[in-house]
Amino acid sequence: MSAPELDAVRLADGVAIPQLGVGVFQVPADDAQRVVEDALELGYRHVDTAAAYVNEAGVGAALQASGLRREEVFVTSKLRNGDQGYDEALRAYDDTCDRLGVDRLDLYLVHWPNPSAGRYADSWRALRRLHAEGRVRAVGVSNFLPEHLDALDGVPAVNQIELHPTFQQRDLVAVCRERGIVVEAYSPLGQGADLDDPVVTSTAHAHDVTPAQVVLAWHLQNGHVVIPKSSRRERLAENLAASALRLGADELQAITDLDRGHRTGSDPATFSLSQIR
Ligand SMILES: NC(=O)C1=CN([C@@H]2O[C@H](COP(=O)(O)OP(=O)(O)OC[C@H]3O[C@@H](n4cnc5c(N)ncnc54)[C@H](OP(=O)(O)O)[C@@H]3O)[C@@H](O)[C@H]2O)C=CC1
Ligand SMILES: O=C(O)C(=O)[C@@H](O)[C@H](O)C(=O)CO
């Protein structure tokens, strides 16, 4: 399969986000430029980073080196827990843009509710100000549960949450959709753990594709924005090509039936400041 044109999803304020992007969590700072340059060369036009990943400068170097115009690449970053608070968030946004070498982001997210600190609603107000001033194209949240969404003034454009076949968070997805919040699936491959399931491997065999492509096609056909991470060029290409795969209704349902509450990351209800910068 060759890499097809990337579909886009419209956020509530009309901004178009490419449905498939590349994530760079756990890509070391020294590798980030190469990985993102590879991704952009292959055709990715959406990059997901975070201040906490400590690789924004490498991502920025790749954007510069790519020769692409700024508006051709959708760039997301996130407010780290240690920078929560109204004034702190405004400063952190400027620092993130400086490290990335951009005037503004396409999407800026509050990374975690970090509820024990009690500062996510103030942080969110700062993001809304940045948006109202036209300094960021869209703002959203990540790892927010319904009670955290309820505590905000206004509605985030996006909630980026852990979502993969064995951990689907269907109640939370339903709440987001009712409110017009686009769901972005992080750890979409279950950090690799969902790729060995016999339902996934047999579907891959039937289509002569890879298990990762089956899982990513399942996400795309379910309307999720999806940001798989790989440091390997051949896997970046493989993941991108998943958008050409079409699964049948029975195949989609068999993967949906794999849901079993298998979280690979942290629980947003308790994840706190001390666990991420
Ligand atoms: N908002 C948040 O709190 C969070 C956001 N994220 C975002 O989501 C992105 C993706 O999530 P992540 O946790 O990295 O997990 P993923 O589900 O994307 O899985 C990444 C793992 O799968 C491997 N992999 C990638 N492609 C393939 C393939 N085609 N075949 C086999 N193995 C493959 C990678 O290895 P290799 O690199 O060696 O190919 C890596 O070990 C992150 O990079 C980050 O941007 C992630 C976690 C939390
Ligand atoms: O990748 C992210 O964006 C995260 O916040 C997390 O993966 C975090 O660093 C973590 O390890 C949670 O289990």
Image (cartoon, rainbow, N blue to C red):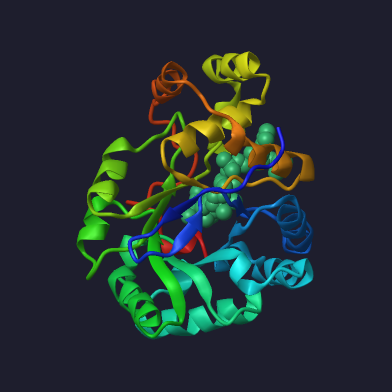
**Nearer to us in this view, 26 or 188:** 188
Question: Splitting the image into 4 quarters, where does residue 224 fall?
Answer: top left
Residue at image location 40% in from the left, 81% down from the top = 130
Ligand 1: give its quadrant: top right
Image coordinates for residue 122, horizontal then vertical, percent:
30, 76
Position of 37 compared to 20: left or right?
A: right
* Residue 223, image x, y percentages: 42, 41
Q: Position of residue 48 (x, y in %)?
A: 57, 58
Location of the N terminus (image quadrant): top right
- Kindly identify the residue that appears in the image at 43 percent across and 83 percent down: 90
Q: Is residue 245 left or right of residue 147?
A: right
Nearer the observer, 81 or 153: 153
Q: Is 214 placed above or below 176 here?
A: above
Q: How many marks?
A: 0
Residue at the far front: name it: 5
Query: Percent from the top left, x then y, of residue 12?
Result: 33, 61
Q: Residue at x 60, y 35 (%)?
A: 244
Q: Residue at x 31, y 36 (%)?
A: 170
Tell me if residue 114 comes above or below residue 192 in the rendering. Answer: below
Image quadrant where residue 30 sits: bottom right
Viewer-proximal residue among 42 and 276: 42
Front in this rendered view, residue 28 or 101 = 101
As drawn, 207 above or below 58: above
